[in-house]
Amino acid sequence: MALSAGAVALAVTLSGCMTVHGETAVVPATSEKEARKVFREFTAKSNRANSRLDTRLNATIEGGALGAINQAALKTRKGAKENGEKIPPIPPLKLRDTRFLIPKQAGWPKFFVADTRGDDTGNRWFYVFQRESVDARWKASYLSVLEPDELPTFPKDSDGHVKAVPSGGGSGLSVAPGALSREYVRTLRDGGDRFADGPHTDKRRTQRERSEKRPGLRTEFADSAARPPQFVPAGLRVKGGGALVFFASHHHTKQTFHKDYAPKIKDPLVREMLSGETPKKAVTYARVSQQAVSVPEADSAGDGVVFLNRIDGMTSAKAD
C-alpha cells in the first residue's frame, strides 16, 4: 500500500524563517510557504526515488515508520529486478488539492501535516512531516489514507494554526500519544477495552488464534512498541474533543513447518528480502506498522481508541 501510493517524502531544511529555535518558545512548526515548498519538492523527489529504486535518496526524505517500510521495499525491488525478476514500476505520485495543518509547538521534534488528495476516490492522504532540530531536515514519517466519513475537523486559532497534543502527560486523552504503541501491543497480546473492536484489534486476535491451530504449521506472534527517537507519535486536536494521532508499532510472525515439509517462498520480493540459508523448517517475518487513530478524551464514555487507517510493510525476513 505505502509503496504503491508513492509514499516518499522530502527533506528540506528551512531557510531561517524563524528567529527563535523553538526549544522553549511556542512557535509555529513552520510557515505555510515553507511547508508548501517542502511538499512540492517532496513530490518530485518521491517520484525520482521510486522510478530509480533509490534507497539513498529515499533515506534523505523519509524517516520513522514510513521510511522503514519504503526503504526496505525499494531495496528489495531493486535486488529482485537485478536478478531478472519482472517487477512492475511504482506509479508516479500525483498529489493535488493540498492543505497544510501546522501547529504551534515548543521543543523538538516538531511536525506538520499535509492533507492532500492522491486518487479519485475522495479519500484524503495525510502525510506527517517531522524534524528533530532547527538544523535537521524535514522527513515524512507517516502516511495514512482516510475516507470522507472519517475526516475530522481541526479547530484553528486566530492565526490559522491547529493544536498539537502533548505526547505524554497533559494530553487529556484516554491514552496519551506516547503510550499508544505500548497499549496497542498489550491489546494484541491480552485484549482489553483501551481500543475499540475492529479488524485491527479483537478481529486480529481472533485471526491469530485460528492461524496458530493450522495443522502442520505452528505460527507464533510477537509484537513490540515503536519507540523514539526513530518513531515519534504525532497528534492533533479535533473538533468536539479528542485527537487524531499517528503512531507506529513492530510485529513479528514466525512460521514453523512440519519436519517433513520445507517452506517454499514463491514471492520474488520476499525471497529477495530473506536472510540466512534456504528455509528448512521456519521463516520469521518482521513488519513495521503505521496507523492513524481517533483517541477520545480521558473522561469520554465512548468505545475507546478507534482505528481509522493502518498501513504496514515487511522490513525483513529470516530463514531457519
Image (cartoon, rainbow, N blue to C red):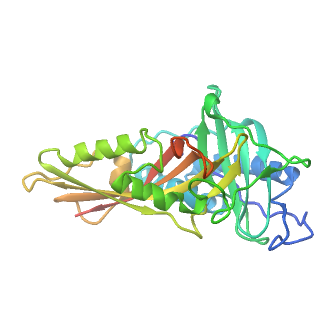
Does 141 sit left or right of 251 as displayed?
right
Does 311 sit left or right of 160 as displayed?
left
Across and down, in percent, residue 250 comes to 44, 59
Across and down, in percent, residue 199 comes to 41, 39
Which residue is painted at 48% across and 39% down in the image? 88
Give the quadrant of residue 65. bottom right
Residue furthest to the left in view is 260
Count of numbered marks? 0
Give the quadrant of residue 29. bottom right
Which residue is painted at 79% across and 67% down in the image? 106
Which residue is painted at 82% across and 73% down in the image? 24
Does 215 sit left or right of 244 as displayed?
left
**Front residue (pair 185, 274):** 185
Q: Is residue 71 visible?
A: no
**Front residue (pair 206, 313):** 206
Across and down, in percent, residue 79 comes to 43, 55
Across and down, in percent, residue 21 comes to 84, 72
**Front residue (pair 128, 58):** 128
Q: Is residue 283 visible?
A: yes
Q: Is residue 205 above or below residue 169?
A: above
Q: Is residue 178 above or below residue 255?
A: below
Q: Quadrant of the C terminus?
A: bottom left
Give the quadrant of residue 139. bottom right
Which residue is painted at 61% across and 50% down in the image? 299
Residue furthest to the top in view is 121
